[in-house]
Amino acid sequence: MASTVIDSLEKAAEPDEKWTRVRHKGRRRPKACHSVAPSYIAGGVSNSVRPSSLSVPAIMEEHKRIKYQWETSACYHGLQEIFESRMSPSNISDAICFGTGSFDPEDSSWEMKRKAHIQLAAFLFIVEQLQRNSSHTIRCIFQEPIFNTSDKAFIRALGHEVVDSPTGFELVSPTTLVFGIHLYRDVYAQIIGKCLPAMFIGTPQEVWEECYGSDPLDWVELNELNKRCDKVKFPEDTGYTTFSSTTIHRRRCNET
Ligand SMILES: C[S@@+](CC[C@H](N)C(=O)[O-])C[C@H]1O[C@@H](n2cnc3c(N)ncnc32)[C@H](O)[C@@H]1O
């Protein structure tokens, strides 16, 4: 995963707004781009359920521990600063989290687990922040084809919904917060294919352009997203790639 691709993005502060427009500066090839998803999960339904090795209480315990550690990090404080001071009242009705990866990965990879837990914690933290400005409860939905039974039961135990692909794509509306870190191009294409969500947290156009080099990106919806949103770089999880190449896009109020 590209860890420093957005190092080359320059933030130019708007005089009256604390949101910044992220501008591209220089061209540096990212280490990797996730253009194509494995065909068995990209748009459709995963046809096999992976066995679980962790119980729900064990996943819950790990989540509490990793979340607690993350809450002392510069990444957390950076996110808090963005959402506390730079957010106008929210019109978000629902929040969809795509592709966190498994909390119980096949190879028990600690790095994958840590990443999934921190991405989950960040997603729920953002929803909590947006909820403060909202009179109604923001519905939280998760779509991740590699979730096994324990992953799904864990998310449901937290009080949220899990849907099978492609249901999540169909639920994206102009009042949705979309959160999807380091996803494949065809997954993002399905997320923004129907309409522009109110907020999109994921890989920005600049990074895709770097991936494609001199080849045309030819992605109308991403171009629209880029043009119609204010952007701020997602704070890095220092020493890890958890949020590398990630930008928070907020559709401007007058743009529906
Ligand atoms: C490159 S991995 C990124 C995982 C994690 N977010 C990270 O930052 O490492 C892409 C993820 O997208 C998931 N994915 C693939 N097809 C998807 C779909 N249709 N809906 C949601 N997630 C999908 C994959 O299972 C995988 O976990």
Image (spheres, rainbow, N blue to C red):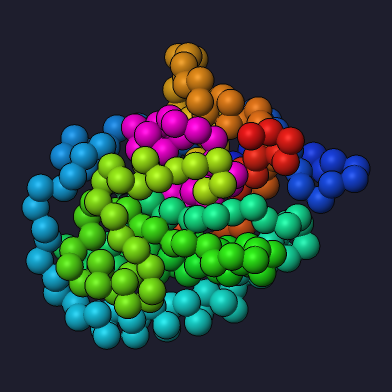
The answer to if 228 sits in the magenta stretch is no
Q: Report if residue 201 is visible in the image.
A: no
Going 43% across and 65% down the picture, which residue do you hit?
120
Quadrant where the C terminus is found in the figure: top right
Please tell me how many numbered marks the rendered image carries.
0
Residue 107 lies, in percent from the top left, at 18, 64
Residue extending farthest right: 15
* Vertical side of 43 occupied by 240: above or below: below
Decide which of 217, 211 is in the foreground and name it. Answer: 217
Query: Could you tell whether 18 is left or right of 234 in the image?
Result: right
Residue 220 lies, in percent from the top left, at 51, 20
Query: Could you tell whether 64 is left or right of 176 in the image?
Result: left
Decide which of 244, 149 is in the foreground and name it. Answer: 149
Q: Quadrant of residue 24?
A: top right
Q: Which residues are magenta?
A: 177-202
Going 37% across and 34% down the picture, which residue do you hit?
190
Going 50% across and 33% down the picture, which residue do you hit?
195
Residue extending farthest front: 136
Query: Could you tell whether 226 is left or right of 49 in the image?
Result: right
Going 84% across and 47% down the picture, which residue do you hit?
17
Decide which of 14, 197 is in the foreground and name it. Answer: 197
Residue 16 lies, in percent from the top left, at 90, 45
Residue 108 lies, in percent from the top left, at 21, 69
Decide which of 152, 205 is in the foreground and name it. Answer: 152
Query: Could you tell whether 44 is left or right of 131 in the image?
Result: left
Q: Report if residue 179 is visible in the image.
A: yes
